Amino acid sequence: MSNLAVLPIIIPLLSGIIVAFFAKNVKVSRVLAALFTIINALVAVYLTSVVFTDGTVILETGDWVAPFGIVLVADPLAAVLVMTTNIIALASVFYAPFALTVKKEQHYFYAFYFFLISGVSGAFLTGDLFNLFVFFEVLLMASYALIVLGGEKVQLRESIKYVLINLFSSILFVTAIAFLYGVVGTVNMAQIAERVQEVEQTGILTTIGILLFFVFATKAALFPLFYWLPKSYIVPNPVVSALFGALLTKVGIYSILRVFSLIFVYKISLTHEIFIWIAALSMIFGVIGALSTNNVKLIIAYNIIPAIGFIMMGIGMFNEPALSGSIYYLIHDMLIKTALFFIVGAIVYVAGTSDLKKMGGLIHHYPVLGWLLFVSAFVLAGIPPFSGFIGKLLLLEGALENDKIIIVIIALLTSLLILYSIIKIFVNGFWGEQRHIEPTEKKPLAGFLVPVAFLLSFSILLGVGAEYIYPSIESISTYLLNPELYIDSVLKE
Amino acid sequence: MYKPNDLIFRTTTSLIAFILLGFSIYLLLAGHNSPGGGFIGGLMTSSAILLMYMAYGMDIVKKILPINFRLLILIGLLIAVTTGIVSLFIGVPFLSQTFTYVTLPIFGKIELATAMIFDIGVFLTVLGVTITIISTIAEDQ
């Protein structure tokens, strides 16, 4: 028992409530929000260090013993993702004052931002399938409020689509949990895993697994179910888009990773084979979307989909290098997507438009912004020595181990096209003559750029310091490939 | 001038609202170990207040109930979360609860549970949220 596991959930929750009391006083809420985020980040770092030295931290909430009560399980994977979430939160809280108008900040931005972080951390940490649904709802509620923040017409239109699709997948989620409960008689993930193992995933269990996969695939925006994502992710403020792009889809893909490495792992030739093809199609369609548009925000939003495809590919391969690659890529993508959304937010701010055809020559006034975008493009596409390279290398290694040559070719081509889609912003937006409509005097950008540089430094660290980080990631994938470790740590204390 | 013909409605409201409010408090207090609870209690209280809104109009009810319902949401949340957090400081798992029996002059021997405090938080939050939603929709022209 250790209450440490609940702190990354409870600190943001309490912070959100406290900040909401001071919502009208923007200065106080900014200071408080920054302070609480720093505290939470430090706690997350401490939790991760404890998990990596002493093993998984378990908390049986309310003193109810494991299969009966709700358990929070801070295993290495969850701890690393919570830490990454907090790094993103830290960057966002310092970016927000520059990106948001005072009126939006007064409309409880910081409160909902904290509730979102709380829900995301909860989803990573929970060891109970129904509780996972609850934390999905917590983060979705916060995201509904954040997506309409500002109340513009286009936001309301997109939010209806967003709310409906999420409500539908939530209904499906509860239904799938009810089916699963009907078959195995428990919602504790460790106990589900144990019982599915006993019956070797016979009968209806695979069907329920696929049903759960569809729920998570909707949240993660995988191939047939990504249509709702790009447009609804570009309508809110850049800082909200960044939080959505970095965290929400990743919670979906984390759930797939968790459920299909812990519970449904006995019919791999069926389920995981499907995943590989879905991954390939997500990559292709996502990158086609990114190439099809001249809206800078939309280019970044479409780039979420191939990234999810890459992570999915590793889960489909289900061997050690591929899973390490997936986890590496997951962390890398959370950081770099936030950075890219921030950069695009700054570009739109200085150019006054999000249409690439109306931009040009930004490099004359904003060289730092330009080069940060350039580096980000390289990080995203996986040019060595940046973090994307290590993730992709491991994924391809895993794919080659399973003799899946076609997906290797698709993945490499997709990477090339991703690089092209981002470099397009650089070439059209930063090169050439100044064409944007805004007055030509220089706008101060330091507030926008510091959080971006902060995130990029982590990306570079992940790439350059791979030698030191890789063993930890490898230990996570070994842990995932042995579900008994998770089951034992939860049920047999 | 248009005058609504709502004598029956107003008379029954003043009667029913009392019963609703009383019963909702009963539900709140019974909640932690028999049917009821903060959620349903909060909903029932807000339905009583809503009934008064409909019978007497927003302005009059706002005058007799000068409560900032948005603040009520936050206070409720704070109470509910605090009951969980207290257990962190006394070194038991998050959300642990306890109870004790006390003997009071009139009521006799009753059970006091910490789950009750959590329920009060839920009660206030539900009340605040429901009234905020309904009054926002009602004020929208």
Image: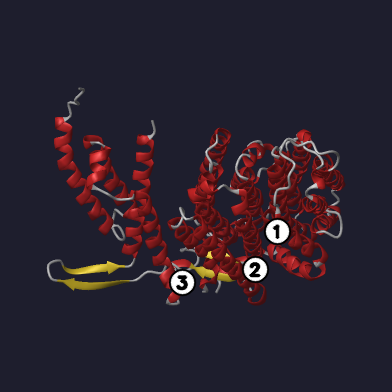
Crowding at mark 2 (Cα within 10 Å: few <14, some 14-19, many 20+): some
In this rendering, would A192 be left or right of A292? left
Instruction: Kindly identify which chain the residue marked by label 3 belongs to.
Output: B
Crowding at mark 1 (Cα within 10 Å: few <14, some 14-19, many 20+): some
Where does label 1 land, which residue?
A450
The amino acid beneath tag 2 is Leu
* Quadrant in the picture for residue A425: top right
* Quadrant in the picture for residue A17: bottom left
Is B102 located above or below residue A333 in the figure? below
- Which residue does the image show at 81% across and 52% down from the upper left? A371
Find residue A322 and report its horizontal and vertical position in percent.
78, 57
- Which residue does the image show at 28% across and 56% down from the upper left? B28
- Which residue does the image show at 70% across and 56% down from the upper left? A446
Is B2 located above or below residue A109 in the figure? above
Residue ranking furthest to the left? B106
**Cα distance between the residues tagged 1 and 2:** 41 Å
In this rendering, would A476 be left or right of A106? right
Is B20 located above or below residue B37 in the figure? above
Where does label 2 land, which residue?
A485
Find residue A321 and report its horizontal and vertical position in percent.
80, 60
Q: Quadrant of the N terminus of chain B?
A: top left
Give SS at disc 1.
helix
Instruction: Kindly identify which chain the residue marked by label 2 belongs to.
Output: A
Give SS at disc 2.
helix
Where does label 3 land, which residue?
B93
